[in-house]
Structures are given as structure tokens and as C-alpha cells.
Image (cartoon, rainbow, N blue to C red):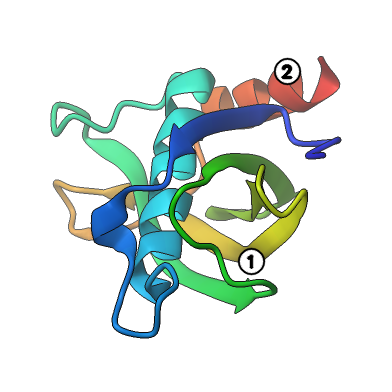
Amino acid sequence: MLTGFPVVIGRPVDWGEMDAMQHVNNVAYLRWFENGRAALFHRLGLVVDGSAVVAPILKSVACTFRAAVVYPDDVKIGVKVTDVGADRFTIAHAVWSERLQRVCADGDGVIVAFDYVAKSKCGLPDAWRASIEALHAA
């Protein structure tokens, strides 16, 4: 279902995520992506609690909606790193619907290394690169 994604989390679809059009509202998918990113950051050992000088920050995110999800359902969110640059890495997200038995949304996001003291992007720390490499080699 989400083969090739080293980080996969699951969650039930909440009734409150439905909208007037009788399907899960678009913003819920972005929240699901966000939860997947948080799980990825945790697995990579990236500090996101405000105590780090350099931390990941979301530069951009895109989502393609492939099928409408409705309550009740359970989804799985997969996340993987697809590219690593000098100061950023790109991640792919995918949302699998148990009810539909298919990917219902996918997209990508760009994560930048951000220096919160200097208030500017900075080079990707070597430790991040090593963690990304180790996670995807497993």
C-alpha cells in the first residue's frame, strides 16, 4: 500500500473533518501531511520543540487529491525524503484510504534548515544528512 515509505503513521478519519460537500475537507489532508512530517522529523532525530538553534521549517507544500475520503475510514500517511540539497530536502507524502484501498492524496513538501538565531536559512547540518541516509537505507 505505501511501499517505499520508511515512515508510515495511521489514524482514524474524524467526523469533524467532513465538510458541507460530504467528504473530508481539503485542509485535513494538509494536517495529515503535517502529522507525517512530524513523525519523519522524530524518526530523523530533528529537534522541533523550540530549543534548537537550527531546526526544519516548511518552505512549501503541494497536494494532489485523487479520491474523496468520507467518514468512517482509517488512513495511513506515508512520508519519505526524495531529494537532498545544500540547505533543504524534499519529502513526498501519500495518504492511503483503508476504505477505498487506494492512495487518495499525495504531494510533496520542501523543508529548509533554518537558523532561528540568525533568522535565515542555513546549510543542511551533516547530522541531518546522515539521519536521512540511514533512514532510507534501512
Above-or-below relation of 10 to 118: above
* SS label for mark 2: helix
Above-or-below relation of 86 to 105: above
Above-or-below relation of 126 to 94: above
Give the farthest residue toward the bottom.
21
Q: Which residue is mark 2?
A: 134
Which residue type carries mark 1? Gly
Q: Can you tell which quarter of the image residue 79 is in?
A: top right
* SS label for mark 1: strand
Residue at the image point whose x is 52% and y is 23% from the top: 44
Q: Position of residue 127 (x, y in %)?
A: 54, 23
Which residue type carries mark 2? Ala
Above-or-below relation of 39 to 76: above
Q: Which of the two labelled residues, at mark 1 and mark 2, occupies the earlier sequence position?
A: 1
Q: Which residue is mark 1?
A: 107
86 left or right of 103 in image = left
Decide which of 40, 114 is in the foreground and name it.
40
Residue at the image point whose x is 55% and y is 55% from the top: 88
Q: Position of residue 16 (x, y in %)?
A: 23, 58
Decide which of 10, 137 is in the foreground and name it.
10
